[in-house]
Amino acid sequence: MAMKKLYIGSLLGALLVHSLVVELAICSSNFTDQLALLSFKSSINFDPNNVLSNWTQETNFCGWAGVSCSRRSQRVTGLILRGMGLQGTISSRVGNLSFLQVLDLRNNSLHGHLTDEVGRLHYLTSLLLTNNMLEGGIPMDLHRCRMLRLIYLTKNNFNGSIPKELSTLPFLRYLALGENKLTGTIPLSFGNTSSLQRLVLQFNNIHGRIPTELGQLQNLQTISFTDNRLTGSITSCNF
Ligand SMILES: *[C@@H]1O[C@H](CO)[C@@H](O)[C@H](O)[C@H]1NC(C)=O
Ligand SMILES: *[C@@H]1O[C@H](CO)[C@@H](O)[C@H](O)[C@H]1NC(C)=O
Ligand SMILES: *[C@@H]1O[C@H](CO)[C@@H](O)[C@H](O)[C@H]1NC(C)=O
Ligand SMILES: *[C@@H]1O[C@H](CO)[C@@H](O)[C@H](O)[C@H]1NC(C)=O
Ligand SMILES: *[C@@H]1O[C@H](CO)[C@@H](O)[C@H](O)[C@H]1NC(C)=O
Ligand SMILES: *[C@@H]1O[C@H](CO)[C@@H](O)[C@H](O)[C@H]1NC(C)=O
């Protein structure tokens, strides 16, 4: 009898430990997302429409303006704050939103660098930052976001050259880098980005030859190159 009680006792103990571990795991995962969002908020120094005013710890972050979450695991999958007049920088902690799929901060006044931590967003499909004042290089680590389909960085102050690693993204459809301060040449390897539909590079300072390799891209519909220092032409039945 005593043996049986002992057995049940230790079984209950094991169950308690087990559920505690599960709970800790759940808490730590969504706590990371909450911290990342609060860090995003704290690097915004002007929010004229008070969109971030309900980003407080009193409410679940999945209900915060502009935030969407996966229903089951309550992880952040979308951060969408378009045209809100936000001023400030993009916190590198955004790279901790491990399940983020869409980052859409178009039409704001964000400045500073887009840091390499963005490369940790392995589920990111859409990086939409058109029309801000972001500067510095396009992060090299962006090619680690293997799910990326849309990269919209048009109308910022990005400089340096186009990372050739971006050409290895297997699903990349739109690469819009127009109206920045990009230099260097168009990497030849983009001739291998077979998923590419649109390549927008106008109003930069890109020079050199337009790679004839781009003519191999079966899905390419639009290329815009105007106002760069490019030479050559593309000869292919696709154009
Ligand atoms: C974390 O997840 C748990 C369980 O789903 C939930 O009860 C809790 O409110 C969440 N915490 C935050 C800060 O959202
Ligand atoms: C926060 O604000 C947004 C937009 O105004 C609203 O849709 C959302 O329900 C609010 N969330 C909470 C928790 O009050
Ligand atoms: C989040 O990101 C920052 C900087 O990118 C890092 O220092 C920190 O350890 C990360 N993890 C958590 C759980 O916040
Ligand atoms: C951004 O602003 C421009 C000009 O005001 C507008 O034409 C465009 O539709 C806006 N884009 C988004 C995604 O809000
Ligand atoms: C890009 O701009 C930054 C300032 O934002 C500057 O420090 C850096 O040297 C520039 N890089 C290139 C390659 O022009
Ligand atoms: C394109 O891919 C082929 C086959 O993988 C490879 O041999 C070639 O070097 C690549 N071209 C460039 C410019 O990267």
Image (cartoon, rainbow, N blue to C red):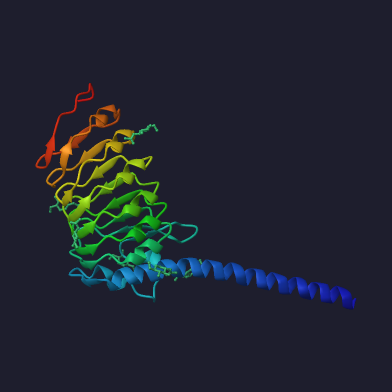
**Residue nearer the viewer, 231 or 154:** 231
Residue 7: image quadrant is: bottom right
Q: Ligand 6, what quadrant?
A: top left
Q: Residue at x 22, y 64 (%)?
A: 112
The quarter of the image holding the C terminus is top left
Residue 60 in view in this figure? no
Residue that sits furthest to the right in the current view: 1
Compared across the picture, whether 54 is left or right of 85 comes to right
**Residue nearer the viewer, 127 or 135:** 135
Q: Is residue 232 above or below residue 13?
A: above
Q: Is residue 137 above or below residue 50?
A: above
Residue 232: image quadrant is: top left
Q: Residue at x 20, y 70 (%)?
A: 47
| Tally of numbered tags | 0
Residue 119: image quadrant is: bottom left
Residue that sits furthest to the left in the current view: 227
The quarter of the image holding the N terminus is bottom right
Residue that sits furthest to the top in the current view: 237
**Residue nearer the viewer, 12 or 200:** 200
Residue that sits furthest to the bottom in the current view: 2
Compared across the picture, whether 146 is left or right of 18 comes to left
Q: Residue at x 24, y 54 (%)?
A: 129
Q: Is residue 173 above or below residue 123?
A: above
Q: Position of residue 202 (x, y in %)?
A: 14, 43
Residue 35 in view in this figure? yes
Q: Residue at x 40, y 57 (%)?
A: 120
Q: Position of residue 156 (x, y in %)?
A: 17, 55
Q: Position of residue 144 (x, y in %)?
A: 39, 51
Q: Position of residue 23 (x, y in %)?
A: 57, 69
Compared across the picture, whether 25 is left or right of 236 comes to right
